[in-house]
Structure formats: structure tokens, C-alpha cells
Amino acid sequence: MTEEYPRDLVGYGGTPPHANWPGGARVALSFVLNVEEGSETNVLHGDGRNEAGLSEVVGGRHPPGARDLGMESLYDYGPRAGFWRIHRLFTERNLPLTVYACAMALERNPVATEAMARAGWEFAGHGWRWINHYELSEDEEREHIARAIEITERMTGQRLRGWYCRYAPSPNTRRLLVEAGGFRYDSDSYSDDLPYWVRVEGQDHLVIPYALDTNDVKFGAPASYGSGEDFFRYITDAFDQLWEEGAERPRMLSIGLHQRLVGRPGRAHALARFLDHVQAKGGAWITRRLDIAEHWRATHPAPPGS
């Protein structure tokens, strides 16, 4: 076992750095709203099939080349209704979040896009379209990243500073982000409770890990969150555990949200309860991922020779 292994199974080991979050917070809490509807796989978009997952049903009911109007309408609920419910929950409490934004979805709903920008939310790249980047060629992926940068800046006035692929990056993604320039972090990892540095093409590059367990994707069929109560209980336990650990070693928690999933009434009610729990408990820095990245860069810069 002397050859170089491309995975880091050690990380910070038993001595993670003290995050020194602003205000002495025990937990840096990052809410992420995934905006994908209107950019998913669909025959309307020139694809040979329709999106078949991350919804109330398991798709694949229609023959190739035929529109699945049921699946389309389940996705349409997100930007038409679910978004505005989530928007109210966060703006009424004056809470920030990060938007993992598919650029095509932003273009197709300029009204919601303007509302997100007006709220001061951060836009992080989630692709030009909501498709698997690991299925793209290198040139295709480079083009998709460039389109996402251009469209998002045109629609929101923000240059993309963060990035997260659908589920997993390609072997080229991180290198292409460094090549494009301007990115302060990516979140294409689930491997830690704290940010960490990697080397890409001889440059230090920051990773702000994401999470799939504290994520409403588990409402998608087949579901593991059966009710809003399940969701509330799990993310509350996660927050409370990190809050206790944070007395000595502050951590970070990501909560992933989707307009078409948690935007449904019974689930949004659970999200509202969690927001109130966090605010009542205190000790949390509720912030955007870009703010976490900038704090980490200032407080824990890449070690010399990393």
C-alpha cells in the first residue's frame, strides 16, 4: 500500500480546528434552496426521456419521447407555490440562505429569481441544467459552467462564487471551476462537518461540504421521511448534537431544501418549527455559504505548502 491513494480518509482526525464562528456561535447553519424546476430532463428540453426522480412518485411511466404531464406538474408546484411559501418563512424571519441555482430554471421564472435577489440570497452554481455533470464530456462541462456563470449574472447581478453539481461532480469539475476563475468554494463533497482545503492545479481551493441526510430529498419517492414530523425530528437532533459539540469544537450544518418537496404545506410547517427552534435556542450563525467561505479563508487560510 505504497502507491498514492486519491481519497483522504483522515481529514482533521481527532483534532479539528476551532472554527471561531462570528459571535462565538457553536454552529454555522447553512440553509440551501435548490432551484431546478424547468431545467430537469424533459423531452421539451430536447431530451429523449423525462425526469424520473426526486418527486412524490417514481417516474418512468411514459414511453421514450412522450411528455409525462404528471411528473411535470409535480415539478411545476415548486416554482408556482412551494417557492413562495419558503420565501415567506425566511423573509419574515429575516434569515439568509444560499440558492443552488440551475441557470435555465432562473431564466424560466424571472419573477421568483428577482424575489430571491431582492432578499439578498446568495446564488451558487448548480449547473446550466439539472443533469449529471459526470455524464458530460470535458468540453461539454466547460460550456455548461460558462453558461451558468453568464446567465446567473445576467439574471441576478451576482457572479457565481460557489458551485454544487447534481449529486456528484465529474473528475474534471473542480479543475474546470479553477480554470474558469472567480470561484471561492465548491460544495461537491459530503465528507466533513467543517470546510477544508484541497490543491487543484497547483492552487489552494476551498471545499464547503454539503449533506444529504439533513436534506428534504428524503421526501422523494421512495421516501425515508414519511412526514414533516420525521424531518423536523431528524434535523433538530442533528442541530442539537452539533450545538452540544460546539461548546468546545464548533461545527457546520447544512440543511438542503427543494421548492417542490419541503414547499408542500405539511412539510413547510415542520421547517417553520425548526427555524423557530434554532432561533429560540441561540448559538447559531445562520448564514450563506459564501460567508462561511470568506470567514474560513480569513480565519483558517490554506496551510503553507499544502
Image: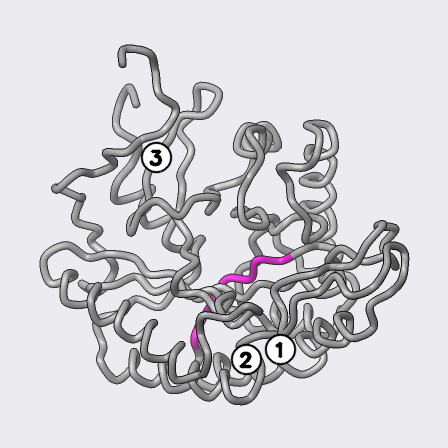
Q: Callout 3: 10 Å neighbours few (<14), some, many (20+)?
A: some
Q: Position of residue 64 (x, y in %)?
A: 86, 55
Amino acid type of the residue that numbered disc 3 sits on in the rendered structure = Trp
Residue placed under numbered mark 1 in the picture: 83
Asked if labels 1 and 2 touch by Cβ distance under 8 angstroms, the answer is yes
Residue 193 left/right relative to 75: left
Relative height, residue 56 to residue 159 (above, below)? below
Q: Position of residue 114 (x, y in %)?
A: 68, 70
**In terms of secondary structure, where does tag 3 sit?**
strand
As for residue 97 lying within the magenta part, the answer is yes
Relative height, residue 123 to residue 268 (above, below)? above
**In terms of secondary structure, where does tag 1 sit?**
helix
Q: Position of residue 80 (x, y in %)?
A: 72, 80
Residue placed under numbered mark 2 in the picture: 86
Of the image marks 1 and 3, the number of the one nearer the N terminus: 1
Q: Which residues are magenta?
A: 95-101
Q: Callout 1: 10 Å neighbours few (<14), some, many (20+)?
A: many
Image quadrant holding the N terminus, namely top left
Q: 280 or 301: nearer the eye?
A: 280
Residue placed under numbered mark 3 in the picture: 197
Q: Quadrant of residue 53?
A: bottom right
- For image coordinates 42% across by 33% down, the residue present is 205
- For image coordinates 65% across by 72% down, the residue present is 57
Number of marks in the image?
3
Q: Quadrant of residue 280?
A: bottom left
